[in-house]
């Protein structure tokens, strides 16, 4: 790391070279103080600093101040600047890092130190409703792309000195700020240590999305998402109160929560804001989860046992001279609905109605009329996907899609016995999964009775808030 040179022009040429003489790098030379004896240069990137703050609270005080002895000029000038964040720097890399982060640097002739003023003006959207995790009652505000704004929102919810924020910079070419947030005195120390260690070991050129952090915290790949992403600050705050760890990445309107257990996928903010459905809502979600992954497999399985049904049932549900076998009907319909789901996020909103209309005609009428698929197959896939949409957590949605197809293949080749064996293998696989060292199926396996009050049903809110959460094997 090179020190700042005492020659002002050499420092300016070095910085211009580092920034490849980019057009938006502004270098403004001026003389400091009433006596105009000290030469200085203000360096910043145009468009990402608050020019009004710089003009009123930095430039004007510098032009009107009285310069003291040369040895004390840096300290005296830093005291004159009317800004809350003023730092002294001695290294050239400190200058470049400050400039790319929207800060303004002032260098002086015949001095090997500089001043950094923190007055950025990043463009960001206003606070909006959380679109992916909407609730019928409760807060509607969502996280934004700016890290400082998200921390501000989180602190407005958790008004406690125990809320700790650890800032880190990740990236070699471009540094991105991330914040590890947790509640001191509540957080599980083993979980926190694992998250800190895994993030510290991350070495990448740049970060443009939080998914790389998600993968590093998970460590081992799985068909199940072992971390949870949320765009709701109240969900993040609730997780921190339970002893979990949150990670917020600058530029991403989502926060990562770890550990995430299987049971967490069936919990929504509505559970804690509404009185209704306290005992039934989560049971319905569990039923829909199993329905979504098993129903297509059960449908083609029952088609192999047509002899056990009456002719009327067989004709209505299984066979009416269709061109495609039941298995390929399921595959075709799952493929088409998957394409429609993906397309709905890519096309303009004005075209969604048109695509829905075309899909209805092609699948709902033409395919059935042409006897390409059976109406019962269409109903089966419709129920399957409707059931999957009850699980609002997107991380589990990908797992359900994979399991749905796997069980469909198992049912085709190994029938009912294959489903039993496949389910057993799935349970054993899930038992071995761990999220930040915590068993994925906890508190079901290993069984922990004291934690069941917020699993299959939502317990009394006062009891939930006052209870102390703990996680098994988090240090292993």
Image: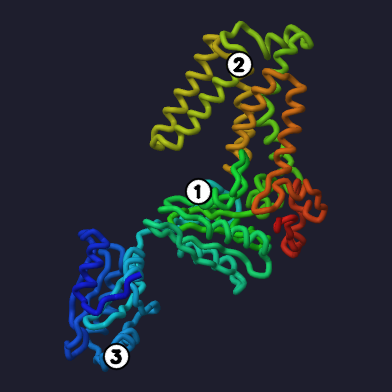
Residue 464 image point, x, y percent: 74, 59
Q: Nearer the viewer, mark 2 or mark 3?
A: 3
| C-alpha span from label 2 to label 3 | 88 Å
| Residue at x 40% of width, y 59% of height | 175
Q: Badge 2: few (under 14), some or many (20 or more) residues near its Cα, within 10 Å? A: many
* 260 lies left or right of 470: left
Q: Which residue is under mark 2?
A: 375
Q: Nearer the viewer, mark 3 or mark 1?
A: 3
Residue 120 horizontal side relative to residue 389, left or right: left
Q: Residue at x 63, y 38 (%)?
A: 390
Residue farthest to the bottom, as pictured: 69
**Quadrant for the C terminus in the image:** bottom right
Q: Quadrant of residue 53?
A: bottom left
Please tell me how many numbered marks the rendered image carries.
3
Query: Which label is found at residue 244?
Result: none
Q: Where does the image place residue 21, in percent across and percent down from the top left? A: 21, 60
| Residue at the disc numbered 1 | 211
Residue 214 pos. (x, y %): 54, 50
Question: Which quadrant of the figure has residue 239?
Answer: bottom right
Question: Circle 1 — which element?
Answer: helix
The mark that comes first in sequence, 2 or 3, is 3
| Mark 1–mark 2 distance (CA, rounded to whole Å) | 40 Å
Determine contact: label 3, label 1, CB under 8 Å. Answer: no
């Amino acid at each position: 790391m090179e020190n700042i040179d005492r020659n002002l022009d050499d420092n300016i040429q070095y910085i211009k070279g580092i920034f490849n003489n980019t057009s938006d790098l502004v270098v403004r030379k001026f003389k400091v103080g009433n006596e105009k004896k000290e030469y200085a240069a203000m360096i910043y990137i145009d468009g990402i600093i608050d020019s009004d703050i710089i003009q009123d609270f930095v430039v004007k005080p510098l032009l009107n101040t009285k310069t003291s002895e040369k040895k004390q000029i840096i300290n005296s000038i830093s005291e004159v600047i009317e800004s809350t964040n003023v730092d002294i720097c001695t290294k050239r890399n400190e200058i470049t890092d400050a400039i790319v982060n929207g800060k303004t640097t002032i260098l002086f002739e015949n001095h090997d130190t500089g001043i950094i003023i923190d007055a950025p003006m990043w463009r960001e959207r206003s606070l909006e409703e959380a679109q992916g995790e909407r609730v019928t009652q409760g807060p509607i505000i969502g996280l934004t792309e700016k890290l400082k704004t998200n921390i501000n929102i989180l602190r407005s919810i958790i008004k406690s000195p125990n809320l700790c924020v650890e800032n880190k910079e990740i990236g070699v070419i471009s540094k991105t700020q991330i914040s590890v947030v947790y509640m001191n005195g509540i957080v599980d120390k083993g979980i926190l240590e694992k998250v800190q260690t895994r993030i510290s070991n991350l070495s990448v050129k740049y970060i443009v999305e939080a998914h790389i952090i998600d993968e590093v915290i998970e460590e081992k790949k799985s068909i199940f998402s072992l971390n949870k992403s949320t765009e709701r600050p109240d969900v993040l705050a609730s997780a921190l109160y339970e002893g979990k760890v949150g990670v917020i990445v600058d530029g991403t309107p989502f926060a990562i929560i770890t550990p995430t257990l299987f049971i967490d996928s069936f919990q929504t903010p509505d559970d804690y804001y509404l009185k209704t459905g306290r005992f039934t809502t989560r049971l319905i979600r569990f039923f829909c989860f199993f329905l979504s992954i098993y129903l297509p497999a059960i449908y083609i399985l029952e088609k192999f046992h047509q002899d056990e049904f009456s002719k009327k049932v067989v004709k209505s549900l299984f066979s009416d001279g269709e061109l495609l076998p039941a298995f390929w009907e399921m595959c075709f319909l799952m493929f088409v609905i998957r394409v429609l789901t993906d397309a709905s996020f890519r096309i303009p909103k004005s075209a969604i109605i048109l695509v829905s209309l075309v899909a209805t005609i092609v699948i709902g009428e033409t395919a059935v009329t042409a006897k390409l698929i059976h109406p019962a197959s269409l109903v089966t896939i419709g129920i399957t996907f409707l059931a999957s949409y009850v699980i609002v957590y997107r991380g589990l949605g990908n797992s359900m899609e994979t399991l749905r197809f796997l069980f469909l293949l198992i049912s085709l080749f190994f029938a009912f016995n294959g489903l039993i064996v496949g389910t057993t293998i799935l349970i054993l696989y899930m038992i071995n999964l761990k999220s930040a060292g915590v068993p994925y199926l906890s508190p079901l396996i290993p069984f922990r009775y004291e934690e069941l009050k917020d699993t299959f049903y939502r317990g009394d809110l006062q009891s939930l808030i006052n209870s102390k959460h703990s996680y098994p094997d988090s240090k292993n």
